[in-house]
Image: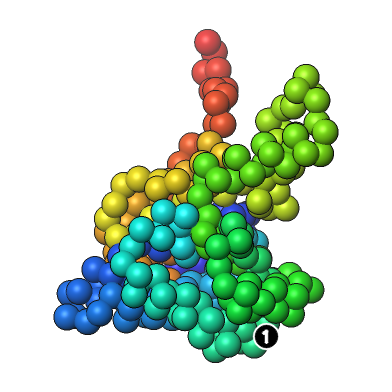
Amino acid sequence: MTFESKAVPRHIAIVMDGNGRWAKKRFLPRFFGHKQGVDALVKVVQACIDRDIEYLTVFAFSSENWKRPSDEVSGLMGLVLAAVSRYLARMGAMGVRIRIVGDREAVSDKLRNAWNEAEASTRHNSKLTLNVAFNYGGRWDILQATKAAIKAGVPAEEMTEAKLSEFMAMSYAPDPDLFIRTGGEVRISNFMLWQVAYTEFVFSDCLWPEFGEAQLDSAIAAFRARDRRFGGVKEVPAAVGA
């Protein structure tokens, strides 16, 4: 399935859910599901490039995921380091700009340095901006933006939605046009709360490791069928002779 550039969403946000259940169905440790999920992400990145998507934001690790078993959290951290090492050159060659979004204070220096390297080495790429939300939460984003605005000396009477948006973690990107959640769950889970005010939602039963071009095209097709009015009313032409 192909789409005209003007018909595709400019920015897609994805909650990549179902890695653990994918592994469980195969009697494998949850870590193997996360590993397979990284491979699925690389394929979806290429699919987005092929469809002229400008921004892709993925929820890799939420600020609530620290509550998971320590061995799973440790495995995820190691997986991120391995993924950077394995795929960084490939992403760069694909023209992908990588940006890490979230609170970096809680992660190790080693992981933080890997992120810095990924961002620095891909900063000139322009085919697709891949925002990896790690240790991120929508409430955290709003709170940190508010604190930053106060620190910058923005007077209360000058605070507007547009002004606060300037301090959001992804202020450089347009709000998502399309939000996809895989794995069958139907909730936002504290992801981009500020930015999805007028985003179109698609919830898929597909487990993330099995998500590919067909599922992406299905979500884009659903997006194209939506009547986006952003709170307004679309005028209907008067009938001839009325």
Image-quadrant location for residue 8:
bottom right
Instruction: Please indicate whether residue 223 sits to the left or right of residue 171 in the image.
Output: left
Rendered position, 52 above or below 84: above
Q: Is residue 4 visible?
A: no
Provide residue 135's location: percent of width, then percent of height.
52, 59
Q: At which x and y percent is residue 156?
A: 75, 23
| Residue for point 37% across, 80% down | 36
In the depicted view, which residue is nearer to us: 180 or 132?
132
Whole-percent x, y for residue 175 in the image: 61, 46
Observer-nearest of 94 and 64: 64
Q: Position of residue 11 (x, y in %)?
A: 59, 55
Quarter location, residue 26: bottom left
Q: Secondary structure at mark 1?
A: helix
Q: Nearer the viewer, residue 17 or 214?
A: 17
Q: Is residue 107 visible?
A: yes
List the single residue furthest toward the top: 242
On screen, residue 33 versus residue 141, left or right, reads left
Going 59% across and 57% down the picture, which residue do you hit?
103
**Residue at left 66%, top 52%?**
170
Report the quarter where the N terminus lies: bottom left
Residue matched to label 1: 93
Q: Is residue 33 above or below residue 179?
A: below
Locate residue 166: give its quadrant: top right
Q: Residue at x 68, y 30 (%)?
A: 161
For label 1, count other residues whose C-alpha is less than 10 Å away and answer few (under 14), some (14-19) or many (20+).
few
The front one of 6 and 59 is 59
Q: Amino acid at mark 1?
A: Ala
Q: How was the colour assigned to the protein in this rendering?
A: rainbow
